[in-house]
Image (cartoon, helix red, strand yellow):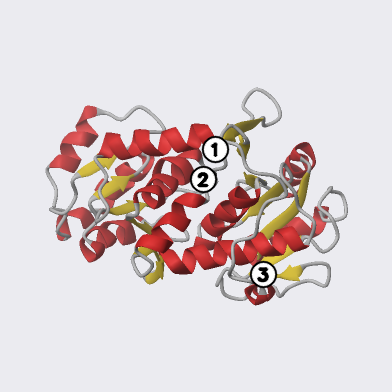
Amino acid sequence: MEWNIGYTVKKWAMMTPNKTAIIYEDNPITYKDLDNRANQLANFFKDNGLKNGDRVAVDVLNCPHHLALCCAAARLGLIFVPLNFRLVGPELEYALNNCGARVLVFHDSMLKDIELIHSKVKVEEGKFIYLKSGVPDAPGCPAWAVDYHEIRNYSLEEPEPYRPVEFDDPLCIMYTSGVTGDPKGAVLSHQQTYFKNFQNILYTDMRQDDIYLAQIPLFHSGGLFVASTPTLCRGATLVLRQGFNSETFALDIEKYKATIILGMTSMLKMLVSAGTLNQVDTSSVRVMMGGGERTPFSLLDELSSVG
């Protein structure tokens, strides 16, 4: 079957090109915008010799580029490797060499750690890609890296992969926390992700006009494969922030009339403690999901009594 996860965005870019796919730090990004970014990245990867099965690693904060990179990799049959942005030099070195990444995209705020290891990893010359994060006083692009924004010159047309992407081809290598030794790279396929999309769509009764609010890291399975890819598969809208702030999260519920919310138990505790939920209208929320640790019934009772 010649199909891949990247087609989900392509489909909505054709059907509803001006529909907002992502609201990132209050800036809307349409499905057509996201599709164009993915195609430019895919053309960059293909022109630089990447083929089916090659690994593309990312070490970035939450941002739309993270999702565009995942989509671009999927379209060429490349394997996407989202790295924990809290990893330090030796941990990054291990993961990059363990997965055999040919490309690394990193935010400027990660440069200090990348500089320590860039000559020790398998990432090829000309395939370190520097991306601005908007963090104040961040360092500039080093001489050994390519500025991400140069990729904007690449074609908006979708490139053909070297061979068709099969349904059971690997889509992603996601690293575990390594509590029993070195982190392990869990391989997730296009097929597994496709059915996980629909599992989450059915579980939440997600609709095309839903506004999904989730401020958990995209390097986590929850951020990427429970919230983001199902939302884009359904043609709904994802509200995305670079990081989590309990007050901003609560205010975003009212501001964007969020209908589905995903928050880990620790985040939900912070939401209740901050008290902001009592000051906003939460009547738009239809579904709330959590996890990460045991959620006490007392916390659920507190959440049900606010707003």
Quick check: 222 left or right of 115?
left
Q: What secondary structure is found at the residue carrying circle 3?
A: helix
Q: Quadrant of residue 205?
A: top left
Quick check: 183 left or right of 235?
right
Amino acid type at image mark 2: Ile
Determine contact: label 2, label 3, CB under 8 Å: no
Name the quadrant of the N terminus: top right
Instruction: Pick the residue in front: 171 or 238.
Output: 171
Mark-to-mark CA distance, 2 and 3 = 23 Å
Q: In the image, what residue occupies the spot 27% across and 39% down?
A: 204
Rate crowding at label 2 as few (under 14), some (14 to 19) or many (20 or more) other CA atoms within 10 Å.
many
Which x, y percent locates residue 51?
A: 75, 49
Amino acid type at image mark 1: His
> In front: mark 2 or mark 3?
2
Instruction: Pick the residue in front: 296 or 23.
Output: 23
Residue located beneath label 3 in the image? 148
The total number of labels drawn is: 3
Counting residues from the start of the chain, the first of labels 2 and 3 encountered is 2
Determine contact: label 2, label 1, CB under 8 Å: yes
Mark on residue 190?
Answer: 1
